[in-house]
Each structure stands twice: as structure tokens, then as C-alpha cells.
Amino acid sequence: MNAIPDTDALPGAFPPEPAPAPVPVLYQDPYLAVVDKPAGLMVHDSKLARGEDDFLADRLRAQFGRQVFLVHRLDRATSGCLLLAFDRDSASALGKALMAGEVEKDYLAICRGWPAEERFTVDHALDGGPGKPQKKEAVTEFERLLCGELEVPSTGFPTSRYALLRARPLTGRFRQIRRHLKHLSHHLIGDTSHGDGRHNRTFRMLGVHRMLLHAERLRFPHPLDGRPMEVFAAPEGEFTKAMGWFGWRL
């Protein structure tokens, strides 16, 4: 009897793709978890998916071996803290806390230029994205953490200036931080939809190909007893590579 050939050993056969690395878990208990979402991965299937079949929600169901409920969302290009629940009651309680403004979300962002003030607030109404033209209140608090320059000519200047910001959205509008930075003309680096292509190209030439927005911190009431929870995710990879050019340390 002839043995069944090992297709992986046949000429021209492709080895199976390795399984994706587990999503880092920052905190977990029987009711909820906070994970560190990688940049470049969509959270769930949507009209923006454009034929993709790899989603964070699916990975998390397989990783935890149970149903998960996403409490909020992050853009595909954004990394960092993402909150999820393991049951409907916990998801409902966390969702109500989010709608009541009891969930704090801090982001790190690298933008073009140096904002004039150390702390400032943008109160600029935004629509709901494609197909949702109605504008609603949108407020983001910003803090300028550090400034730096690259020896790359900018329009009318011998160098290019950049800043590391901490952003705290007080409302939850579509791409709020990105669009508020565009409103200020301090475009987010790596943002291909609302950013500045010239500065994006500078960072790509230096080896940074991602959008430089990272969900650094979540603070929320625990759904079981309301105790305050606080979880942090340190930036990694290309985000810290970019920070290293300027000698920035948090």
C-alpha cells in the first residue's frame, strides 16, 4: 500500500502560516479583561473591513475560550488598552459607565509642530463619519509632554518639529483625536486619512510605518462592586522607536 504523501514536503507546497501571537493581557478577572491591542489589527468586522478576515474579537474568543463583549473600540491603526467583558451583565454595567463619562481614556500621540500651550482643550463638533453627517459635540483635552526636532527641512524651515501629546477625549466621536489634531493643524503622524502626507513620508523613510496613536491608560469602575480600576499599556515597537529619535522618555 502506498503511503499518503506529506503535502508540506511536496515541491511547490507552502508551509502553513504560523498562528498569530497571543494578544497581551494587561488585566483579567472572571468578569472582564483589558488587553493590549496591536496596531494594524481591526477590532471587529465592519463596513471598513474591505474583505479582511482577521479581527481582534475573533482572536480573543479563541484565546480566552469563551464569549467576549467589547466595551469600546479602537481604530485599526491604534494600539493599546482595550476593555472587554465576559458576560452580558458586566458588559451592560461597563457600557453604562462609559455613557455616563465614568471611563477615562488617555492616549499618547505624536503630532507635527509644537502646540503653543502646555495644556489646552479642543471643543469642535464632529460628524459621525461616513453616512452620518449630523454634527455633535466633541471635546478633547490635550497635554503637551515633550518637544523635539528632526534634521529634515520643512516648508520654510531647516528642521521639522514634532511633539508628544497626551490626549483625553471627553466624548466618543468617530476618529475624534485624529480629527481634532487636524483641526489644530498639528496633524497626527502616520494618519493617512487626516494627517499630513509630507511628514508621514518622513517617518516612513526613517522606518516608522504605523499611525502614532496609543491608548496608554484606562480608568473605570469595576462592574461587580464599582471599585476604581486603572490599567496602563506602555508603547512599544515603532512608537518607541520614534520616541527614541528625540530622546523622549516618559
Image (tube, rainbow, N blue to C red):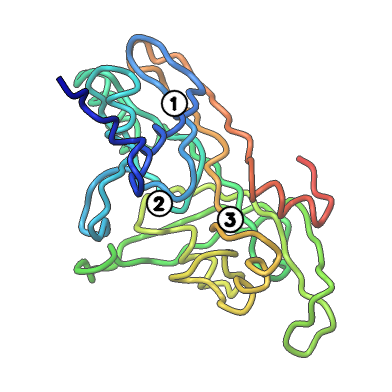
Label 1, secondary structure: give it.
strand
In the image, 199: left or right of 156? left
Quadrant where the image shows the N terminus: top left
In the image, 56: left or right of 4? right
Q: Which residue is disc 1 drawn over?
A: 34
- Across and down, in percent, residue 22 comes to 44, 27
Residue at screen point 84% across, 51% down: 247
Label 2, secondary structure: give it.
loop
Q: Which residue is disc 2 drawn over?
A: 76
- First in sequence: mark 3 vs mark 1: 1
Residue at screen point 19% across, 69% down: 131
- First in sequence: mark 2 vs mark 3: 2
- Across and down, in percent, residue 100 comes to 33, 36
Depth check: give the residue in front, 5 or 170: 5
Label 3, secondary structure: give it.
loop
User: Number of labelled discs?
Assistant: 3
Crowd rating for badge 2 (residues with CA inside 10 Å; few <14, some 14–19, many 20+): some
**Quick check: marks 3 and 1 in contact, CB under 8 Å?**
no
Residue 100 can be seen, yes or no: no
Instruction: Please tell me whether residue 59 is drawn above or below residue 118 in the rendered image.
Output: above
Which dot marks residue 212? 3
Depth check: give the residue in front, 19 or 218: 19
In the image, 202: left or right of 48? right
Instruction: Please tell me whether residue 124 is drawn above or below residue 231 in the rendered image.
Output: below
